[in-house]
Image (cartoon, rainbow, N blue to C red):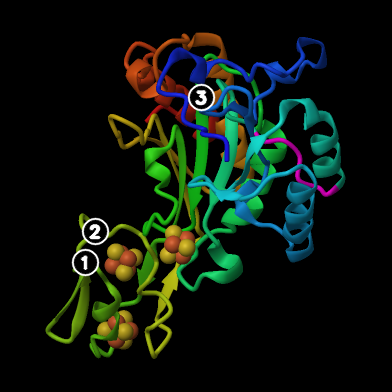
Amino acid sequence: MKDRFIGPQKKSIMMPRRIPDSTGLSTRGGIITERDPDFCIVRLRIPAGMIKPEQISAIGKIARKYGVEDLHLTTRQTIELPHVDPSRLDGLLADLRKNGTPLGAEREEVVNVTACLGTRHCKFGNIDSIGLARELDKRFLGRELPVKVRIAISACPNGCTSERLNEIGITGTRKPIRDPGLCTGCGTCTFYCKEKAIEVVDGIIVLHKDRCMECGFCIMPCPFHIIQGEDPTYKITLGGHRGRHPRIGRHLITVNSEEDVIRVVERIITWIHRQASSGSLLPEQLDELEFDAFRKDMHAMIFGEVS
Ligand code: SF4
Ligand code: SF4
Ligand code: SF4
């Protein structure tokens, strides 16, 4: 078997040697140079990591047809086909497109949108993270920018997608509302609060607002159904990052609907496109880009006021 070790040299960040320039493929995100620069990795577009059984089975067959031995499941919920012969890319990409799994993104652009199962399948979900991820993918994936922008959505503060460690993070939250007059003081809800934000004092519950994360976990278990939830909200953070120097995104705004999430994301992307510079990560530029002023603009756009 051919030894694939090439060494950590500059070649490894160049495009594969055999992609003909005339195809335009060398400029596309989703085609990544492999350690062996004679081959490439093909990353697929799978919003929210949701894929039909027949679609994934067809990907396996297509991979075999083009000599791919293993599929790689990425941390960002996509599938990569490693060790692809660049001279066969045209046929491979056409077959993948027919299967409904086109090329993904990975350069200075909006890369794939990740999401947890949310209200479709998870008992803790406050928002439809999968539906929202698909909508954001449809509108923004591959939008060229000076910096890479990853979007991740978690439907509750458990943060299964580590959304706050992404350039744009969206967390589904839900504020509990109680009627203390009806509370029996049974204490059931206190067992569901991981933040110790609820206490029973003299037979009545007391909510410590400063500790409440608005996860909504205490809403369902009340045996007397006296805890109601407000409508779900979408908490949006900006400038998070994993990588070498992880950073938690800063809170930008909390909105009440998917439509408002889309408006905010559209505005963020336009702002990045116009004002960010290439060569450094978005979190490193936030102060220079006047994050606080941008935050005020967002509040004015959504709520009609500066907060
Ligand atoms: S983030 Fe919350 S809603 Fe999403 S999968 Fe995790 S626990 Fe469930
Ligand atoms: S919403 Fe979550 S953090 Fe707040 S009181 Fe209920 S369980 Fe605790
Ligand atoms: S579970 Fe319901 S009745 Fe029991 S303490 Fe909590 S709010 Fe009161």
**Residue 295 picture location, percent across and down:** 41, 26
Type of the residue with mark 2? Lys
Sooner in the amino-acid sequence: mark 2 or mark 3: 3
Mark 1: which secondary structure?
Answer: loop
Which residue is labeled 1 in the image? 197
Q: CA distance from mark 2 to mark 3?
A: 36 Å
| Identity of the residue drawn at 55% across and 10% down | 274
**Residue 34 picture location, percent across and down:** 56, 29
**Residue 14 picture location, percent across and down:** 55, 15
Q: CA distance from mark 2 to mark 1?
A: 7 Å
Bounds of the magenta span? 99-104
Q: Are marks 2 and 3 in contact (CB under 8 Å)?
A: no
Which residue is labeled 2 in the image? 209
Q: Are marks 3 and 1 in contact (CB under 8 Å)?
A: no
Q: Magenta stretch containing residue 102, yes or no?
A: yes
Type of the residue with mark 1? Ala
Considering every residue shown, the one lying at the far front of the view is 1
**Residue 36 picture location, percent across and down:** 55, 27
Nearer to the camera, 25 or 178: 25
Q: Magenta stretch containing residue 246, yes or no?
A: no
Type of the residue with mark 3? Lys
| Identity of the residue drawn at 82% across and 11% down | 22
Ligand 2 under 8 Å from disc 1 Cβ: yes
| Above or below, 25 relative to 307 | above
From the image, state whether disc 2 or disc 1 is nearer to you. 1
Whether residue 157 is visible to the viewer of this picture, yes or no, is: yes
| Identity of the residue drawn at 55% across and 62% down | 117
